[in-house]
Image (cartoon, helix red, strand yellow):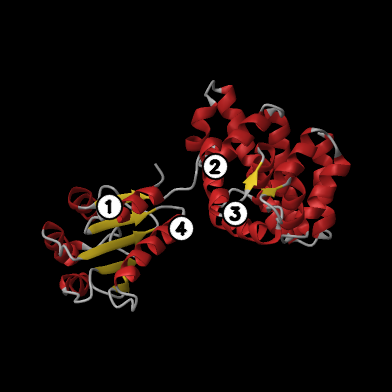
Amino acid sequence: MWEIDQVRQGIVKNQIPSVNLWYGEERFFIQEALQLLKNSYLAQDPSGSGIEILSGKSTGPEQIVEIANTVSFFGGKLIIVEDIPYFQDGQGDALEPFFAYFENPNPGTCLVFLAQSVNRGRKFFKAIEKKGSILEFGSPKRQQEWSAWLDRELAARGKTMKPQVKALFLEWGGHQVGALSQELDKLALFVEGKEIRTEDVRSLVPQAVEATVFELLDAVAARSSKEAVQKLQQVLRQEHSLKVLTLLSRQVRLLLGARAMRQQGRGAEEAPRLLGIKPYEAQKIWQKAAQLTWEQLSWALRECLETDVAIKTGKGEPEFLLELMVVKFCEM
């Protein structure tokens, strides 16, 4: 179940816990869940007097607990504590007021701590795990999850896409929930009728740099220097030459990692964890690594390093040096 759905159901059933820790890589989902929670409190008190947003860095635990224990005369109270530093070293006894509060929280207060990452071994995490609720907000991992998310977002906007258009939209726009959501808003606004078509996506949605880089690598694998240079020029219109070189070098390193895994007899399911990337990207890297040898990839990485040095020492125009490198890739 999506974490956002858990929050939505908790609101409907009036079962949001008094103490919550929300964290994860997908800030878009966290903000969406927060907005749902805020709206539920605004429905009780349109003035918003029952909602307080605090900084964990500038507001001490004792003060937060004091605010949480304050009675609200206009309904419940929602306290959101952002940027919490409670998983860092050196917190010591400073967090004790929280642990006492967690044992007997104010039933009229909903306390939500926000963090980008956590340390599960810390006392603060374990205390909330025992007495409250912890949700990790992550982006969709597998293709089925991305498709389910897209179906829900399309339905919310009264739009539809055929399966092939969905696949194009996700690849074309990049697998970033926040950016894709904004592009869906744009498509819903400008596309007449219910169905969003291929031409709508291509004309209204800017192609993500990462997607273009993958197409560039497809051209390299196909030994098509003309198409590879065209894709390179397209990327260069979006990003600085050194950023483009960094993206290419990263892809080559990932391909080397996947190639090494294949030679070790490992499976594709291990790639996301061992390569440190998301499943959808790991799947592409895994498939592409089968098309290139270890020797080719090692040579390509050396070319990336030599091109980096050439650009930084002024051996030529960066765009020309990158084009030369890509042409060499197609001939390897």
The CA span between labels 3 and 2 is 11 Å
Quadrant assignment, res 83:
bottom left
Lower sequence index among marks 3 and 4: 4
User: Residue 146, which numbered label?
Assistant: 2
Task: Say which element carries label 1.
Answer: loop
Sequence-first disc among 4 and 2? 4
Mark 4 and mark 1: span between their CA atoms? Answer: 25 Å
Number of the label disc, if any, that sits on residue 27? 4
Horizontally, residue 151 falls left or right of residue 127, namely right
Residue sitting at x 29%, y 58%: 87
Q: Nearer the viewer, residue 326 or 65?
A: 65
Q: Are marks 1 and 2 in contact (CB under 8 Å)?
A: no
Q: Position of residue 118 (x, y in %)?
A: 33, 53
SS for dot 3: helix
- Say if residue 56 shows up in the picture: no
Q: Are marks 4 and 2 in contact (CB under 8 Å)?
A: no
Q: Earlier in the sequence, mark 1 or mark 2?
A: 1
Please state which of the two labelled residues, at mark 4 or mark 2, is closer to the viewer: 2
**Where does the image place residue 2, in percent across and percent down from the top left?**
41, 45
Residue holding disc 1: 13
Residue drawn at point x = 71 percent, y = 54 percent: 244
- Quarter assignment of residue 100: bottom left
Q: Nearer the viewer, mark 4 or mark 1?
A: 1
